[in-house]
Amino acid sequence: MLDKGFYSCVHTIDDAIFQRINLKSYKPNCTIPLDELRYIYLSHYGFDGKAHMGELIVNCGIVQQTISVFQELFEAKYPIEKIRLVDEYDADDICSMADNNSSCFNYRTIEGTSKLSNHSQGLAIDINPLYNPYIRMIDGTFSVLPENGIPYVDRSGNCPYFIHKNDICYNAFIKHGFSWGGEWKSAKDYQHFEIVR
């Protein structure tokens, strides 16, 4: 199928998928009903320049926008190293980011706070997080997540995996209604795109 261009397939969260996410990204206190989530199997280009298949779980309200974004990225051969469910990392967001995994749904709080992340509603997608870290100031000290993303805090280089305003990745997400964490004022989350509902 990959030699015929972009491919995507959408499913409700059936028993097989639920068994993969239960007690991981879908925690016992999860407030979002399963019928508001969708599983998407889609193609993307990897760092090796070849087409691969990835999987995301997103909110049912952003399925079409998500597919449209990834189709544009695929057609541009935009490199995304891997797109796996965060459950392959036992829903540990830090481990997922450190492995440069691009992902969406994970019922969790924003790191270092008690506030639910938009990932908890399947409304936020992180792209190549190792090269596009989350940077914030805590008690006068910079915090960088993932920690192995520290070399990529300086955005002045020409790394092909950096996300910058008005580049291919940024424009695809913004065109379809997402906002970018790289434009936040109090912190910078270069990997992060979200739709707030």
Image (tube, rainbow, N blue to C red):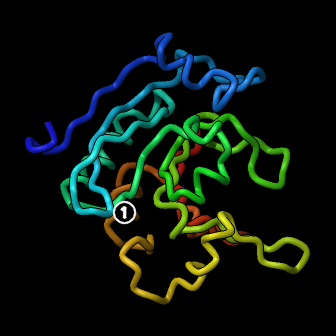
Residue 11 coordinates in the image, percent (x, y): 37, 20
Which type of secondary structure does the marked residue at label 1 adopt? helix
Res. 179 visible in picture: no
Res. 187 visible in picture: yes
Residue sitting at 71 percent across and 23 percent down?
Answer: 31
Residue 4 coordinates in the image, percent (x, y): 8, 41
Residue sitting at 76 percent across and 53 percent down?
Answer: 111
Q: Is residue 96 left or right of residue 58?
A: right
Can you say which quadrant of the picture contains the N terminus? top left
Can you say which quadrant of the picture contains the C terminus? top right
* Residue at the extreme left of the image, as rendered: 4
Foreground residue among 92 and 125: 92
**Does residue 103 lie above or below 97 as drawn?**
above
Q: Residues within 10 Å of mark 1 (few under 14, many from 20)?
A: many
Residue sitting at 44 percent across and 37 percent down?
Answer: 56
* Residue type highlighted by circle 1: Cys
Q: Is residue 175 left or right of residue 129?
A: left
The residue beneath circle 1 is 169
* Residue at the extreme right of the image, as rendered: 139
Residue 22 coordinates in the image, percent (x, y): 63, 21
Residue 176 coordinates in the image, percent (x, y): 37, 49
**Does residue 95 lie above or below 121 as drawn?**
below
**Does residue 38 lie above or below 65 as drawn?**
above
